[in-house]
Image (cartoon, grey):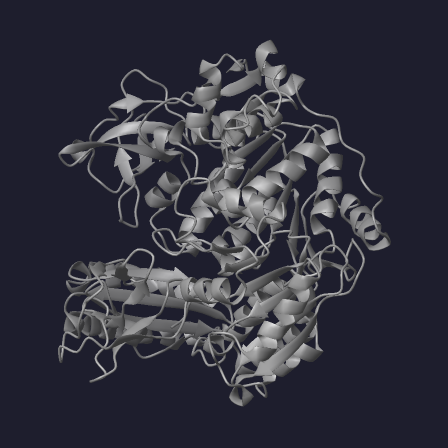
């Protein structure tokens, strides 16, 4: 028995444990490799996380591994250790964590192969074409223009708005042809002439380049338009020149095309992409190319943090404050925080950048854990736009926008500038109301009003996505007097088209960008000046450079002023600062106007007179006094079921277990177990939702308590009849 080995395998099942198996009789097994094993009546693919000479199960009950896929580990030990830490910290089953970190094709047992990367290049016939030959096919001309710089990957072309249909159409004409992978390196373009860095940029670049050896975290806080990306690029160039790789995270796919274009032009190297818009083959090919060191730069959204890199030298997290870095279902990780841990494990520097840093990062600067670098001037010159509040209580409204707003828009449009109107609510109207009896169309699964989407001729629940036709009469009294209450981007677009018929209006929200590449095409049209009035949601707020925008209108500030979430002030100030930053980026004098019924509200007053840093410091002082994150730790246990009684009973039982165990933990750190209660939105998609919060001065205290109790909570009968999960460091707390 002393020579018998037991293999510990993590499987993608919702169980907080690993499983023991006997070795494969013939194949060598490596820790970090994939294996196929019998699990109940089915076969599953898991990851070997260890081996030992003992097992908690009798040897006669154990089964042997059926197949071994890998002779070398899928991940290096430092990355496997990161995933194990993440499973413990976020209280998520390690098998599901490891499965989440793998590209889909590897989860299905396929072999990694970077040769699957599809590459295209111009033929002689294609190089001879001009814009006249593709006058009726502008997309085909766009593809030819992109390939004039050299061969490009299919994924890179897709990120720049080129569809597969366009590629096939141009290939049929003989203008482009497949190319070998080696053509990518041959076509790397030279760095174009860059304007000299500003004094502030030069100081930041020098400071960052002096910390490229070993682990460090630097926060680059720069006002909108200050040239943070230029700083990233110069530091990245230093890392690449040393033969090392760079991992860059951006919050959303929408930022990928413009970021990719700037990176390619400045660095002149091959850049890989990882995001949900790619197909499985493209994602796997980029993953493998990064793993083998073929890619100098990998650019992606939050899941890119899991990609192995052969010689990582720098991690960059752009817009580090953005909520998109927090996974909201399944494995609920925070990519920014995982980036910190990965940089520490692999002993590389981490660069966080934002115009509106998260309060967590500012607290780490305050504690001396992060280096703080600032850019206080716009790279193109000019000042930040002036912010003014329009008191809606004093206005006679003939539409969604007040007279002062209309007058300001008229002036800026006459000066041949663009105007951005921001409203973070899509659809035509959030409520369809009966004027006779007060009935309103309500989703029966969520107990929330349907949103009227006039263009789709549908009522849509924005919580569970249920749709229904627009009724011709009231469901309660039969009246046909149904009126929209409140406004969305669709209504705003319609009103502005009527108000300014001589100026083209474009709406950019999730509805208008549903089709593939629609977002990239609309943004490109805006940047070319085709549209003069931009209407949109927060999709327009994140990092886009619209040089001609000189006026930004915030159509509704009030909705964010009275939220019960303690992070509401932080998020509102971040969003409004980011939206305001779209104005005056080319150095023009710019203006921001806020419509509000509460012009005296402290947040509104502060935004007009102080910068984000001052507002953040005031809000941080309140958090410190109240002992709330980032000066305390929080975790939430949420549960949902069709029967509200069962949800309440489950969380009451969990509270009892937690409170009993917390007495021992409280001697060391103090964990407050809050009484369970309904979520702010108690019913969603037909299921009742409750939650229980844990609050403590130290994260370690919450971790200790959860480690002690989750096994007992998971084993209860009530845990089998409700859906429940643990959310550590939650993004939403209501």
Pick out the residue farthest to the top: 124
Q: Is residue 419 above or below residue 245?
A: below
Q: Position of residue 389 (x, y in %)?
A: 61, 80
Which of the 4 image quadrants contains residue 594? Answer: bottom right
Which residue appears at 43% of the width and 23% of the height? 112
Q: Quadrant of the C terminus?
A: bottom left
Residue at the spot 47% in from the left edge and 16% down from the top edge: 171
| Above or below 27: residue 104 | below
Tell me residue 166's x, y (percent). Answer: 46, 26
Q: Which of the 4 image quadrants contains residue 106?
A: top left
The answer to whether 545 appears left or right of 21 in the picture is right
Q: 304 or 282, which is in the foreground? A: 282
Does the rendering let one see residue 423? no
Q: Is residue 632 left or right of residue 347?
A: left
Left or right? Give the position of 175 relative to 36: right
Q: Position of residue 324 (x, y in %)?
A: 48, 55
The residue closer to the viewer here, 187 or 358, is 187
661 horizontally vs 521: left or right: left
- Please tell me whether residue 133 is drawn above or below residue 98 in the rendered image: above
- The residue at 75%/30% (across/down) is 241
Residue 35 in sight in this render:
yes
Quadrant of the image containing the N terminus? top left
Q: Residue at x 40, y 36 (%)?
A: 102
> As rendered, which of 107 and 698 lies closer to the eye?
107
Residue 717 placement (x, y as % from top left): 14, 62
């Amino acid at each position: 028995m002393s020579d018998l080995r037991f293999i510990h395998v993590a499987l993608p099942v919702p169980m907080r444990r690993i499983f023991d198996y006997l070795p494969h009789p013939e194949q060598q097994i490596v820790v970090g490799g994939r294996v196929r094993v019998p699990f109940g009546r089915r076969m599953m693919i898991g990851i070997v996380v260890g081996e030992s000479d003992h097992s908690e199960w009798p040897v006669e009950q154990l089964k042997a591994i059926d197949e071994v896929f890998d002779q070398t580990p899928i991940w290096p030990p430092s990355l496997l250790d990161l995933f194990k830490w993440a499973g413990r910290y976020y209280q998520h089953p390690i098998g599901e964590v490891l499965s989440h970190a793998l590209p889909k094709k590897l989860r299905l047992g396929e072999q990694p192969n970077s040769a699957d990367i599809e590459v295209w290049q111009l033929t002689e016939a294609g190089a001879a074409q001009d814009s006249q030959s593709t006058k009726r096919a502008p997309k085909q001309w766009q593809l030819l223009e992109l390939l004039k710089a050299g061969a490009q990957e299919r994924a890179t072309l897709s990120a720049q708005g080129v569809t597969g249909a366009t590629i096939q159409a141009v290939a049929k004409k003989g203008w482009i042809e497949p190319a070998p992978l080696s053509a990518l390196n041959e076509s790397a373009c030279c760095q174009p002439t860059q304007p000299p860095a500003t004094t502030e940029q030069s100081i930041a670049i020098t400071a960052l380049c002096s910390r490229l050896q070993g682990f460090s975290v630097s926060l680059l806080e720069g006002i909108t338009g200050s040239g943070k990306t230029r700083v990233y690029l110069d530091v990245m160039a230093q890392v690449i020149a040393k033969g090392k790789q760079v991992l860059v995270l951006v919050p959303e796919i929408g930022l990928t095309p413009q970021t990719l274009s700037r990176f390619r032009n400045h660095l002149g190297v091959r850049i890989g992409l990882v995001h949900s818009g790619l197909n499985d083959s493209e994602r796997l090919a980029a993953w493998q190319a990064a793993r083998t060191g073929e890619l100098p730069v990998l650019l992606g959204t939050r899941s890119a943090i899991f990609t192995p890199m052969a010689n990582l030298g720098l991690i960059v997290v752009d817009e580090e404050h953005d909520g998109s870095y927090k996974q909201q279902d399944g494995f609920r990780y925070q990519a920014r925080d995982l980036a910190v841990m990965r940089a520490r494990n692999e002993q590389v520097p981490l660069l966080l950048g934002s115009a509106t840093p998260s309060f967590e990062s500012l607290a780490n600067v305050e504690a001396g854990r992060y280096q703080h670098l600032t850019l206080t001037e716009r790279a193109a010159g000019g000042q930040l736009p002036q912010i003014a509040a329009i008191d809606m209580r004093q206005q006679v409204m003939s539409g969604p926008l007040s007279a002062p707003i209309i007058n300001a828009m008229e002036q800026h449009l006459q000066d041949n500038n663009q105007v951005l109107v921001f409203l973070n609510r899509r659809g035509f109207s959030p409520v369809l109301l009966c004027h006779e009896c007060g009935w309103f169309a309500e989703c029966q699964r969520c107990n929330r009003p349907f949103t009227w989407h006039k263009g789709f001729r549908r009522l849509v629940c924005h919580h569970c996505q249920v749709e229904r036709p627009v009724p011709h009469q009231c469901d309660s009294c039969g009246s046909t007097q149904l009126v929209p209450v409140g406004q969305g981007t669709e209504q705003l677009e319609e009103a502005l088209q009527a108000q300014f018929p001589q100026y083209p209006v474009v709406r950019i929200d999730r509805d208008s960008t549903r089709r593939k590449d629609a977002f990239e095409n609309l943004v490109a049209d805006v940047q070319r000046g085709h549209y003069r009035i931009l209407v949109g949601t927060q999709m327009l707020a994140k990092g886009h450079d619209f040089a001609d925008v000189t006026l930004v209108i915030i159509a509704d500030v009030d909705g964010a002023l009275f939220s019960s979430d303690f992070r509401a002030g932080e998020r509102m100030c971040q969003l409004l600062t980011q939206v305001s930053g779209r104005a005056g980026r080319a150095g023009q004098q710019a203006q921001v106007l806020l419509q509000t019924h509460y012009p005296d509200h402290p947040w509104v007053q502060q935004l007009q007179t102080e910068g984000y840093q001052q507002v953040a410091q005031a809000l941080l002082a309140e958090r410190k006094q109240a002992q709330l994150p980032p000066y305390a730790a929080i975790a939430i246990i949420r549960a949902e079921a069709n029967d509200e009684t069962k949800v309440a009973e489950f969380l009451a039982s969990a509270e009892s277990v937690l409170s009993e165990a917390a007495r021992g933990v409280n001697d060391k750190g103090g964990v407050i177990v809050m009484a369970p209660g309904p979520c702010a939105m108690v019913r969603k998609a037909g299921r009742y939702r409750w939650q229980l919060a844990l609050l403590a001065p130290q994260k370690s205290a919450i971790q200790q308590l959860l480690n002690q109790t989750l096994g007992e909570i998971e084993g209860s009968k009530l845990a089998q009849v409700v859906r429940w999960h643990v959310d550590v460091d939650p993004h939403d707390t209501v």
